[in-house]
Image (cartoon, rainbow, N blue to C red):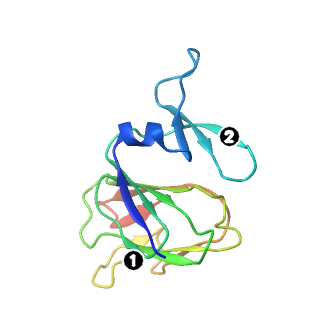
Amino acid sequence: MSLIYTYTLEELKKRPILKLNSTGNASPNKILMTTGIGSRTELRDVPLVGNWVYVNTHFNMVPYTNYLVDTSLTTFSGTLPLMPEDKMVVWIKDVRRTFGTRSLFIIRHPASSYTINELNDNLEVNVSMDIFLIYDADNNNWIF
């Protein structure tokens, strides 16, 4: 079954996969992330702006949205927007740390002329990592 959920920041506080850090010594822009692998948690800086969307099937990226991507069941892709704005950011979080075994493909919009890291190719993410993409309008290029 494919799932796509959109969460507000308040709803994320209640989710078992992501919990806001409540310790007094951490910055407010850090969250504790439970990866779903044992009891491992991480403290990470995250942009707490825009929507957070959980996906485990193909999705189309929209401006100012952060993606909690789960490839634990299957490989799939996310398509970049057709006409991004300068300095537009897309943040992709590998919530289950499974990109290394089940890739995420970042697809250029078919009608676009922009590049990803100055290449005219789509991007396969096959290493468990988070991706922070920024669009550079001067060079018509997504940078990560």
Could you tell me residue 123's position as x and y percent?
53, 74
Q: For residue 134, which quarter of the picture?
A: bottom left
Q: Farthest residue toward the top?
A: 24
Say left or right for 37 vs 9.
right
Cα–Cα span, label 2 and label 1: 32 Å
Which residue is more in the foreground, 98 or 144?
Answer: 98
Residue denoted by label 1: 108
Residue with the mark numbered 2: 41
Q: Which mark is residue 133?
A: none
When the figure is inspected, residue 143 is found, relative to residue 51, above or below; the finding is below
Query: Image point 66% across, 65% down: which residue?
Result: 98
Count the labels in the image: 2
User: In the displayed image of the protein, which residue is found farthest to the bottom?
Assistant: 110
Q: Is residue 30 left or right of 138 when viewed as pictured?
A: right
Neighbor class of circle 2 (other Cα within 10 Å; few <14, some 14-19, many 20+) is: some
Q: 10 Å neighbourhood of mark 1: few (<14), some, or many (≥20)?
A: many
Which percent across, then down, holds residue 26? 56, 21
Question: Residue at the location (39% across, 38% down)?
Answer: 48
